[in-house]
Image (cartoon, rainbow, N blue to C red):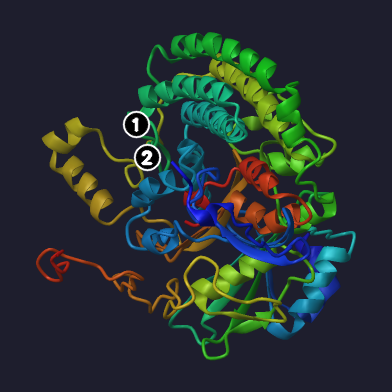
Amino acid sequence: MALPARWSQKIEIPDSADEVMEIQMGPSHPAAHGTIKFNLKLEGERIVDCDVEVGYLHRGFEKMCEQGTWTQVFPYTDRLNYASPCINNVGFALAVEKLLGIQAPDRCQYARMIMSEVSRIADHLTCLGMAAGEVGAQTAMFYMLEARELLYDLVEAVTGARLTVSWCRVGGVARDLPDDFAERLGRAFIHLDSILADCDKLLSRNRVFVDRMAGLGVIPVEDLISYGVTGPLLRASGVSYDVRKADPYLFYDRMDFEVPLGERGDNYDRFNMRFQEIYQSKRILEQALAQLPDGPVAVADPRITLPPKERVYNSIEGLMNHFKLVIEGVKVPAGEAYQAVEGANGELGFYVISDGSGRPYRVRVRPPCFLAMGALSKMLIGHMIPDIITTFGMINMIGGECDR
Amino acid sequence: MIENLKTRFGAELKEASVNNSNENVIAIARENAPAILRALRDEPEFAFNFLTDLTAADWLERELRFDVVYHLYSLKLKHRLRVKIAVAGKDAWVHSAVELWKAADWLERECYDMFGIRFQGHPDLRRILLYDSFQGHPLRKDYPVTRRQPLVEEVDPVVNPRPPSS
């Protein structure tokens, strides 16, 4: 069949090599695992300017927290960083407990620490797996997601849910660790170790992968600090700041672990930081399980902890206690407190203000990836379009937390 | 550290105390803020090189309605400080801290977005989480939580049905 005559015509394309092109990437881009828009100015494929637009997942977290009781905030915190919800739960619980001036029992503190580290491993595996998948290493991605599933099984065994855990309470946790938790964790670790070793072989010295990651996204350390960037991004540049060491909460001061540090602060170092932190989290888990004491998992204070169901159903005092706590909430003394915990992506802070009633007056979250996203355009300028994907992947923006 | 702050800044501090949660808190006036914040960042005994967080709180019934709250941290000395600046609702602005900490850029934009507090000297103060045509500032206590401002018209099968497709 003959082609139409116009097919053989030469099409004139103006030479646009030195022209600045403006394009918008996102808000729903298949290679960016988050709803975010980049307004780019390009010279050829080189980024000359970049404006990052966030907020597509804004759900009014801070406003909604002011509407219910303190306990009712926990389900909202699950939906901040949904890759490691236990850490958010723990952070908020610690902030409220700081305001109340109480400390949860030892077993509870250990359980919180254990679940924080399990969540951190799951979060890092999500970040690493997605980052690998985005540059084409699909195999490594599925391996890591398989490993993550092992950890989600543990989370499910403890909390009853995989993501929306709502596990912590003011002054305690909702459920104790199951009796066979150590056994389950041991089994998961055996599997996890072999998967991590495979992924290490697949990626760490893989020429294609290293070329996509090394030397990219670097900004000077002073700028990182000035931008308020924390977590693996800051440590990849050699600054040893980890809230677990600098400002220990729970029983991290009893744990023997290291803070891995990078040298160059590029995407490859950031990748490596997370990989090594998984091994450190494993160390913490082993020690915490060995030290785990027996005892209650919530403070024995009827003004804070709900009574056991037998008392609620069989005595008027128990029923009233339950009713008052559920309807009016825990009475937190007026004041304010800021509590920082080390989230998987950096310092996760909760700034809470109470006016003395049973409801929070203000709950503010200091989201680690919001601050890191502020530095993203600086990391990108001068690089190429494909580098957006790896740099953005290493920031590991979690929309729920960044946009709240 | 509170003692150091008191000797260094004296009467410029409207309030300086360690609160019940064992946190260092100071309150300063808006006009002194740029100099004090710069001193807190640069002087070696404070060395607050990290602006951890910047936010606000709305106390609707107070004359100085808003508290702009800075959380500072020093990587070197490992100490924290909370700085508060109270401003009136009709005159809700403070000086921008972008020159001191770049983190203030996005944090101040968020604070403007949520509370309508303006930051003098901010290079690009526009909304960040909400869209430009959004009316009002949702974290103010007088913004009703039920108020909805959808960008796309909300359809309801009874109240506001979709037009029948042809």
Q: Quick one: SS at disc 1? A: loop
Query: Where residue B142 appears, x then y in whole percent?
Result: 38, 79
Residue that protrudes farthest toward the bottom in the picture: B90
Task: Find numbered disc 2 in the image and state the secondary structure of the residue it sits on.
Answer: loop
Q: What residue is pinned by disc 1?
A: A161
Q: Residues within 10 Å of mark 1 (few under 14, many from 20)?
A: some
- Give the labeled residue for mark 2: A166
Circles 2 and 1: CB distance less than 8 Å?
yes
Marks 2 and 1, how far apart at CA: 8 Å
**Which residue is situated farthest in the right direction here?**
B44
Residue A144, relative to residue B41: is it above or below?
A: above
Whole-percent x, y for residue A123 in the image: 54, 33
Residue A234 or residue A362, whichever sits in front:
A234
- Neighbor class of circle 2 (other Cα within 10 Å; few <14, some 14-19, many 20+) is many
Image x and y of residue A193, in percent: 59, 12
Q: Amino acid at mark 2?
A: Ser
Q: Nearer the viewer, residue A251 or A187?
A: A187
